[in-house]
Image (spheres, helix red, strand yellow):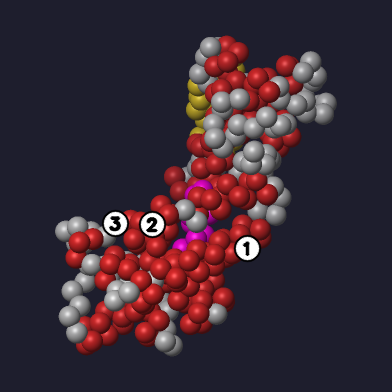
C-alpha cells in the first residue's frame, strides 16, 4: 500500500495510477474515491463500495457483449459459463494486477499485510475503477479500458472449458464402460517450431480411435476425444456414424463434472463449437 500523508503525495499517486490505467480522469476526486477502501475512508459512503456495486454490473455488460459477438454459434449456457469465470473475483484480481492496482489502492493499516493487499480488496477496487471510468467518460471509455484486459481472459476461459468438456466426458464414459483411462498418443508433428501441427490419437482399453490434427497438442487431443465419443456413442445407439447423432443415456453423463453434467444433454454437443458442449446450465 502506498504511503500518502498529504495532498501533494496523493496527487502524485493519482497521476501514476492514471498512467497505469491508460486513462485520464476529468474528475480526479472520483478516481481518489475509486481507490479508497472502506477501511481508510471517513465513512463507508466516502469509500469505493457504491462504485464497486455499479462496476460489477458494467463489467458484466461489457463481457456479455464481447461474448455475444465473439461466439455467435454458442448457446446461452456456454456463454454463461465463460462469463461466470471472467467476472469472478479471482479474474478481477488478476486483471487488477495487470494494471498494478496494488500500488495505488488505499486501505487501512490493519489490511496492509506487509505491503500485500488481499486479492478480494483488489478485485473490489478494480470493479470500483470500472464504475469510475464509466461515470467519468461513459460506456465507451469503460469498454475501451476493459477490452484489452478481458479479451485474454475470455480466450483462456473458453479454451479451458473446451478442453474439460470432450476429454472429461470421454474419460467418464471410458472408465464407466471399460474401467480404463483414455491415453493420448502423439503420432506425428510437422512444421517449423513457431508453427507446428500435431497428429494425436486416443487409445481406450487397447482400442485406437481415429486420430486428429491440431495447431497444438491440447487442440489435437480435444478433437481426438471427440472422434472417440462419436464412435462410442454411435455404437451404443446401434447406428452408424452417418446417421443422426443419438442421445446420451442419463447414466452416461451423471457425475462427469460441474461443467458438463446435465440430465438432458444430447450428442449434438459433440458438434458444438468453438469451445464446449452445447448444453444449458441446469
* Residue displayed at 58% across by 47% down: 81
Query: Residue beneath label 3, please?
Result: 118
* Residue displayed at 37% across by 84% down: 29
Residue 80 in the image: above or below residue 282: below
Mark toward the start of the polypeptide (2 vs 1): 1
Q: Where is residue 19 in the image (x, y as percent from the top left)?
A: 35, 78
Q: Residue furthest right?
A: 243
Mark toward the start of the polypeptide (1 vs 3): 1
Which numbered tag is attached to residue 220?
none
Q: Would you say residue 52 sits in the magenta stretch?
A: no
* Residue displayed at 64% across by 21% down: 252
Element class at badge 2: helix
Mark toward the start of the polypeptide (2 vs 3): 2
Which numbered tag is attached to residue 94?
2
Looking at the image, residue 4 sits to the left or right of residue 68; the answer is left
What residue range appears in magenta? Answer: 149-157
Question: Which of the 4 image quarters holds residue 240?
Answer: top right
Which numbered tag is attached to residue 65?
1
Amino acid at each position: 500500500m502506498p504511503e500518502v500523508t498529504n495532498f501533494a503525495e496523493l496527487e502524485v499517486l493519482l497521476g501514476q495510477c492514471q498512467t497505469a490505467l491508460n486513462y485520464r480522469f476529468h474528475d480526479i476526486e472520483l478516481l481518489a474515491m475509486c481507490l479508497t477502501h472502506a477501511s481508510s475512508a471517513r465513512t463507508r459512503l466516502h469509500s469505493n463500495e457504491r462504485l464497486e456495486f455499479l462496476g460489477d454490473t458494467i463489467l458484466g455488460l461489457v463481457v456479455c457483449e464481447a461474448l455475444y459477438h465473439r461466439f455467435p454459434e454458442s448457446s446461452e449456457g456456454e456463454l454463461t459459463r465463460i462469463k461466470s469465470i471472467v467476472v469472478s473475483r479471482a479474474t478481477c484480481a488478476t486483471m487488477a494486477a495487470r494494471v498494478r492496482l496494488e500500488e495505488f489502492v488505499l486501505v487501512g493499516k490493519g489490511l496492509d499485510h506487509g505491503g500485500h493487499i488481499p486479492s478480494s480488496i483488489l478485485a473490489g477496487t478494480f470493479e470500483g475503477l470500472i464504475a469510475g471510468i464509466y461515470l467519468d467518460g461513459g460506456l465507451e471509455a469503460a469498454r475501451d479500458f476493459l477490452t484489452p484486459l478481458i479479451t485474454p481472459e475470455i480466450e483462456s476461459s473458453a479454451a479451458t472449458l473446451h478442453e474439460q468438456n470432450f476429454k472429461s466426458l470421454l474419460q467418464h464414459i471410458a472408465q464407466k464402460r471399460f474401467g480404463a483411462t483414455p491415453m493420448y498418443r502423439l503420432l506425428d508433428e510437422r512444421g517449423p517450431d513457431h508453427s507446428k501441427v500435431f497428429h494425436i490419437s486416443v487409445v481406450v482399453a487397447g482400442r485406437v480411435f481415429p486420430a486428429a490434427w491440431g495447431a497444438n497438442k491440447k487442440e489435437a487431443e480435444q478433437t481426438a476425444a471427440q472422434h472417440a465419443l462419436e464412435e462410442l456413442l454411435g455404437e451404443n445407439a446401434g447406428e452408424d456414424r452417418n446417421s443422426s447423432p443419438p442421445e446420451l443415456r442419463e447414466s452416461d453423463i451423471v457425475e462427469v463434472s460441474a461443467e458438463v453434467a446435465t440430465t438432458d444433454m444430447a450428442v449434438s454437443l459433440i458438434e458444438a463449437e468453438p469451445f464446449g458442449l452445447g448444453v444449458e446450465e441446469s
